[in-house]
Image (cartoon, rainbow, N blue to C red):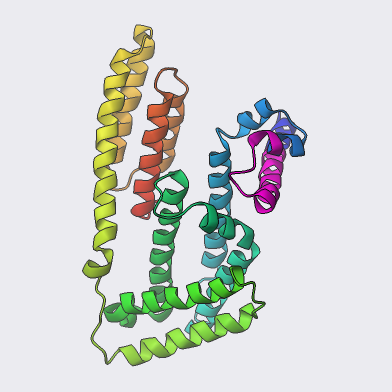
Amino acid sequence: MVLTGVKEISKKQELKDIAVTLFAEKGYHLTSVQEIAKACGVSKGAFYKHFESKESLLIELVKDNHQAMFQKAQSVPQSDALPAKQVLQQRITIELKQMKQNSSIFLLLFKEFPLNEKNAVSFMMEDFRLKLLKWHKQSLREVFGESVLPNIWDVVILYEGMMKEFLSLIIFHRKELPVNRLAELIASSLEAIIHSSEKLEPVLTEDSLCGPLNQEEKMLENKMQQQLVDVENKLHTLSLKVNEKKKLVSSLNHLKEECKQEQPKLYLIEALLQYMKTKEGWHQEIVQLEETITRLFREKGED
C-alpha cells in the first residue's frame, strides 16, 4: 500500500512537471489535457484521477511554488547571532531565487491570466499578492522590531516596489542580475529608509491601505454565508436514505459552527468538506463553498 501511494504521488508530480514544460512551449490555453497525459504516458482518464481539470493542475502547481517560497523564507529566523539586515537579506535572497527559478510559471500567469478577469487562477494570484504583502509586513516587524510600526505600510510598499521592479528585469526582460547583491542592496535600502522615516509622518496607514483588504474579507464572509444557505437548501432536495441525510445535516452543522470560531480548526473543516464532496448531487456547490472558505482563511492569514 505504501509503494502504491508513493507511485501515485510520483505520477502526480510527473504530470505537473510535464505540464510546466508544455505550458512554456505552447501556452496554457493551447495545451490540452490529452497532450499532458500522453507526454506522461498515461490515459486521459488517469489524469483526472489526480486533477479535476487542467486549471486545478495549474493552481496546485502555483500553490506548490508559493508554499515552498514561504517555507524557505520563514526558515530564516530572527536571531541575536545575526544582524537584522542580514536576516532580511537572506529572506529576500530566497524570495528572489524562488521567483527566478519559477520564472516560466510567472510569465505564463501574467501573459494568459489578466488580473481583471474573474476566474479561479486570477483569484489565486490576488490571494498570493495579499499574502505576500502581509508576509513582507510581518518580516519587517520581526527583523526591525516595534520601532518600524509607525511607518510600516510606507516601508512595505517601498519594499514591494523594489522587489517588483527587479523581478520584472529578471523575469520579463531576462536580465542576468546577481541575486545576492540585489538582496543586499534592497535590505540596505530598507534599513536606511526605516532609520530615516522615524522623523517623517507616515503617508500610508492601515486604514487607507488595508481598507480594501478588510472589504475583501467581508465580501468573502458574506459569500460563504450565502453559499452555506444554498448548500443547506440543496441538501433538502437530495434523494438519500434517512440515515445518510442525517449524517450530512450533522456534517453541515459542524462545518457552520467551526467556521464561526475565532480560531477554526482547518483540518476539521477540510475533513468535513472532503466527506461532503463524496455525496452525489451537490458536488459543484461544495467545491465552490470550499474555494470561498479557502480564500477567506487566506485573507485572514489562517492557512
Q: Quadrant of residue 168?
A: bottom right
Residue 31 in magenta stretch: yes
Residue 30 in magenta stretch: yes
Horizontal and vertical percent position of residue 50: 62, 33
Name above or below for residue 247 compared with residue 208. above
As rendered, which of 169 and 267 lies closer to the eye?
169
Horizontal and vertical percent position of residue 185: 54, 86
Residue furthest to the right in view is 41
Name above or below for residue 79 compared with residue 285. below
Residue furthest to the top in view is 241
Look at the image and give the residue range highlighted in magenta.
9-35
As rendered, which of 123 and 148 lies closer to the eye?
123
Indicate the quadrant containing the N terminus: top left, top right, bottom left or bottom right.
Answer: top right
Residue 279 visible in image: yes
Q: Quadrant of residue 150?
A: bottom left
Residue 265 visible in image: no
Q: Residue at x 37, y 75 (%)?
A: 157
Q: Quadrant of residue 196?
A: bottom left
- The chief SS type of the magenta part is helix
Q: Residue at x 58, y 71 (%)?
A: 96
In the image: residue 201, left or right of residue 7: left
Horizontal and vertical percent position of residue 208: 23, 69
Q: Residue at x 28, y 27 (%)?
A: 230
Horizontal and vertical percent position of residue 57: 58, 41
As rendered, which of 134 and 60 lies closer to the eye?
60
In the image: residue 88, left or right of residue 93: left
As rendered, which of 164 and 90 lies closer to the eye?
164
Q: Residue at x 53, y 52 (%)?
A: 112
